Amino acid sequence: MNVDELLEKAKDGLETKMVYGEPYHADGVTVIVAATVGTGGGGGDSRDEKGRSGEGGGFGLSAKPVGAYVIKDGKLRWEPAIDMNRLLATFGMIAVAALFAATRFARVKQDTEGGTRRTRT
């Protein structure tokens, strides 16, 4: 199989089913999950001065849940997926930035109020 055939097969495998799951029905509620899907691929071939050739290629796929459509009593609503790891990491970065800013503010305030500050000699 050459590189072009590999990439064509990979592209053909990408369908809407990868973004939206099959509807799930239970107790009068229908749930359709959704994900964001990213792909990438590439390949190439070459020939050296002795006429030898080579080719190669690769393909990558990533998927991440983003939420679900919920249908209940004829009403549709969107329920987003919450990535707790990302949320906690964001809050952690905000806390570190706030601590750093508070420390800098306290030093500046001390300097402007005539506080003494030791310097190395």
Image (cartoon, helix red, strand yellow):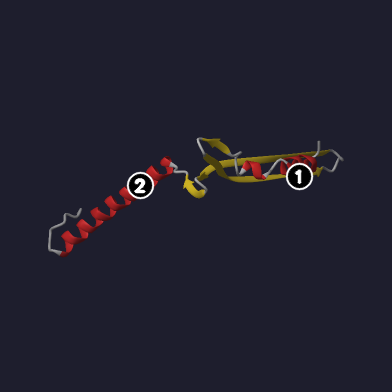
Q: Earlier in the sequence, mark 2 or mark 1?
A: 1
Q: Which mark is residue 67?
A: none
Asked whether 87 or 70 is in front, the reply is: 70
Q: Residue 13: image x %, image y %? A: 71, 40
**Quick one: label 2, few (<14), some, or many (20+) residues within 10 Å?**
few
Residue appearing at x 41%, y 41% in the figure: 84
90 left or right of 22 in image: left
Q: Determine which residue is flagged by label 2.
A: 91
The CA span between labels 2 and 1 is: 43 Å
Splitting the image into 4 quarters, where does residue 8 fall? top right
**Count of numbered circles in the view:** 2
- Mark closer to the observer (2, 1): 2
Amino acid on which the number 2 mark rests in the picture: Phe
SS under mark 1: strand
Amino acid on which the number 1 mark rests in the picture: Gly
Asked whether 48 or 22 is in front, the reply is: 22
Q: Is residue 108 above or below residue 15?
A: below
On-image quarter of the C terminus: bottom left
Q: Residue 43: image x %, image y %? A: 73, 44
Splitting the image into 4 quarters, where does residue 7 fall? top right
SS under mark 2: helix
Splitting the image into 4 quarters, where does residue 110 fall? bottom left
Q: Residue 12: image x %, image y %? A: 74, 43
Q: Which mark is residue 44?
A: 1
Asked whether 72 or 95 is in front, the reply is: 72
